[in-house]
Amino acid sequence: MALFSCYVDVERFLGEPVKELLHFLICLRKKEKLIVITKIAEFFQHVDHVSQFYDFKRRKKEEFLNSLPLSRVEKLILWKLLKNFFLKHSENSSGKPIPQDDLIALRKGRLFEELVYHLGPVEKKKVDLLCLHCQPMVNRKRLSIKCRKRELSGKNIDVAFWGKDYVEGYECKGNVEFFLRLGLKEGDKARKVKEKVWYLNQLAVTLKAYFRDVRIFLASFAPDIDLDWCREISTCWVKECGEEKLHFELTTVKELLRQFS
């Protein structure tokens, strides 16, 4: 029987605003946790920039907080954490400040990865091990994933869970529909989007040759997206690798939370 494992090249830095908000959310009671994460995902989908955060604070803060099944103290703590998430500055490894709007997008992606990691797999009974930022390996060798003859090197998946003859992997994006629409443009960024779609599909195909049960997800923290369009454009792109259908699944945080519950 084949053995799945992960190679982790570089651990990603998890800044304090992400870490503190994550800890608050995962420590909530189960019922409140699912509702609050859903509300935050809806909030995050429409607030991408500092200016939008200030506008939301002025017009919708009280409505948002009143919709949460939390105590007054918990709501005050959560709002302070959200304020830090959007407004607290950070620097890159060279000490150069990161543009705040870019930092917000980065933090959203990190938070979603960590939530998926902590909430756990869809198939809980089948999973024994888990890993963040996983370059998949089979029998202790990193997999070579190709689109026809072109090797898709240097890529990984954000979260992996696995057990006996089972692999479940997640690529987490703040907004999958926005991510895929970038692939319709020109340039290096568009090429990388398509390559990620090719990678996920060919990874699923490759793993299914070794394991009986494989589920690979492209998951969106933004809950209200056009999943049908996302599947249609992804299916169109994977045909460039000789595949007639998608072998990975597209989903949103709302669907994942229903399954995690």
Image (spheres, rainbow, N blue to C red):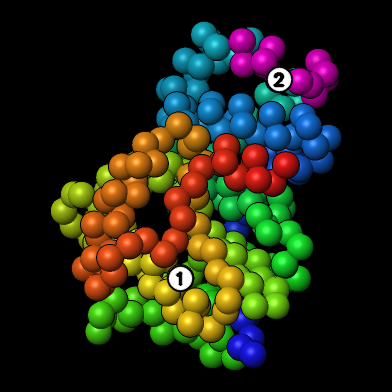
Q: Residue at x 51, y 16 (%)?
A: 56
Q: Residue at x 44, y 79 (%)?
A: 206
**Residue 78 in the image: x percent, y percent?**
71, 27
**Residue 233 in the image: x percent, y percent?**
27, 50
Q: On the picture, is 225 further left or further right than 92?
A: left
Q: Which residues are magenta?
A: 63-74
**Residue 108 in the image: x percent, y percent?**
53, 42
User: Eyeballing the image, is 252 above or below 156?
Assistant: above
Identify the mark at residue 150; answer none if there is no mark.
none
User: Eyeballing the image, is 149 above or below 238?
Assistant: below
Q: On the picture, is 221 further left or further right than 20?
A: left
User: Eyeballing the image, is 6 above or below 113?
Assistant: below
Q: Nearer the viewer, residue 25 or 231?
A: 231
Identify the mark at residue 204; answer none if there is no mark.
1
The amino acid type of the residue labelled 2 equals: Leu
Q: Nearer the viewer, residue 23 or 199?
A: 199
Residue linked to disc 2: 68
Real-space Cα distance between discs 2 and 1? 38 Å
Of the numbered discs 2 and 1, the one sitting upstream in the chain is 2
Q: Residue at x 50, y 57 (%)?
A: 217
Res 255 visible = yes
Marks counted in the figure total 2
Q: Nearer the viewer, residue 140 or 72?
A: 140
Q: Nearer the viewer, residue 192 or 86?
A: 192
Q: Residues within 10 Å of mark 1 (few under 14, many from 20)?
A: many
Q: Nearer the viewer, mark 2 or mark 1?
A: 1
Quadrant the N terminus occupies? bottom right
Secondary structure under tag 1 reads helix
Res 20 visible = no
Secondary structure under tag 2 reads loop
Quadrant the C terminus occupies? top right
Q: Residue at x 63, y 10 (%)?
A: 62
